[in-house]
Amino acid sequence: MKILNYGKQHLDQNDYNALKSKTFKEFLTTGPLVKKFENNLKKRIGAKYVASCSSGTAALHIAFKSIDIKENDVVIVPIINFISSVNILMEMKAKIYFADVDIITGQMTPKTLSECIKKNNLKKVKAFVTMYLGGSCQNNALFYKIKKKINCFMIEDACHALGGKYKINKKFFSVGSCEHADISTFSLHPVKSITTGEGGLITTNNKKVFEKALLFRSHGIVRKKNNHWEYDVISPGLNYRLSDLNCSLGISQLKKLNLFIKKRNKIAKIYFKLLKDIDAIQLPALFKGIYSSWHLFIIKINFSKIKKKKSDLFKFFLKKNIRVQQHYIPINEYSFYKNKIKGDFKNSKVYISQVVSLPIHYSCSKKDIINVCKNLKIFLYTK
């Protein structure tokens, strides 16, 4: 029986045709489709420089290396986040500090960032990482003011937000344009806005950052243009390249980005219509001047108030062949990190106890969403 997942890729015949490109007769990797994909992204996003890579995690690693994060450098991240950035920073031996999140959105805010700096008496911050949980890019201008005030780097973990936009002074900016950030990172995993199978991106308007990114992405190797056999290694690097095979799919998928985001916004409107009058549910916050990519549709349910367990909701939906999810468990609750992170992140505790991510992706039909809402009501109202 068909299972409705919270997220899923959508491939059409054009995508399958792209994977049969005759270009692959000569190049499977380090070929012309990589550059073509990156150039198409530059036009779509509006950043001066785009580098593709093998995953969203690789994008974050490249970003950190591109700004020369070293041992004991201070980096601030949200306590609600996917684990990638923290794992990388741990391996790099940076000093990681955690900011609490907004109790409604689950995102770090300028206030919680400032509180983290003040509480920990941080005199010198190398960088902070924002994370647009769910796809809504909030507080860009305010974060950028803080970045300039404390003279540090600002990295947008925009893995949920490709295709999103935000308005400042009556002008819309694409997420990833880096008009209000030093670097933006993206994931091209199957559940994201578009997919290359696995893949990632970094965007920046800083030429030096971009050049370091390219170097680290490919072993730290530089080659002479005319003599391919002559090359040098000028810094440590890894193989984080994205293949032409992946980029061919990405080129095809990028043509549908607007279509995908419009569909996700349409699904979100259906959820708002069907769930707006249920007291037990708090719907996602909407913000003026933000066009969300709706990577996730996250609702909040006060389970203690309705005297039901969150785990029972997940089990109930599984029986209906619907897979909902929670995004994300606070990092200080993981076994490896719980004794390494000090502080009481009150908002994150409340947030994770209540959040449920409902299915939202291009392949969802209106009938699917109606069925999700019907079953959610059955769970909530059945004693």
Image: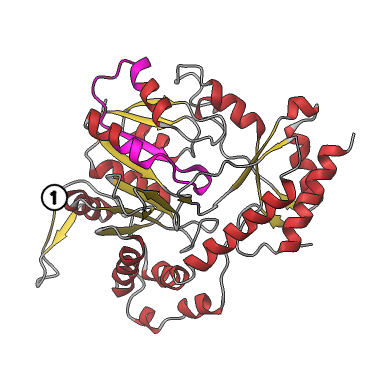
Q: Residue furthest bottom?
A: 22
* Residue at left offset 25%, top offset 49%: 237
The quarter of the displayed image where residue 330 is located: top right
* Residue at left offset 70%, top offset 52%: 273
Pick whichever, 114 or 197, lies toward us: 114
* Residue at left offset 51%, top offset 56%: 192
41 over 54 or under it: above or below: below
* Residue at left offset 51%, top offset 17%: 344
Q: Position of residue 207 (x, y in %)?
A: 17, 53
Q: Position of residue 343 (x, y in %)?
A: 47, 16
73 over 83 or under it: above or below: above
Q: Secondary structure at mark 1?
A: loop
Query: Can residue 185 be found in the magenta stretch?
Result: no
The quarter of the displayed image where residue 131 is located: top left
Q: Quadrant of the N terminus?
A: bottom right
Q: Amino acid at mark 1?
A: Ile
Is 68 left or right of 200, judged from the image as shown? left
Is 156 left or right of 220, judged from the image as shown? right
Pick whichever, 377 or 86, lies toward us: 377
Residue, disc 1 = 234
Is 48 left or right of 348, judged from the image as shown? left
The magenta-colored residue range is 117-144
Pick whichever, 309 or 94, lies toward us: 309
Q: Residue furthest front?
A: 170
Regarding residue 88, the answer to whether it shows in the image is no
> What colour scheme does the image use?
secondary structure
Q: Position of residue 292 (x, y in %)?
A: 50, 52
Q: Residues within 10 Å of mark 1 (few under 14, many from 20)?
A: few
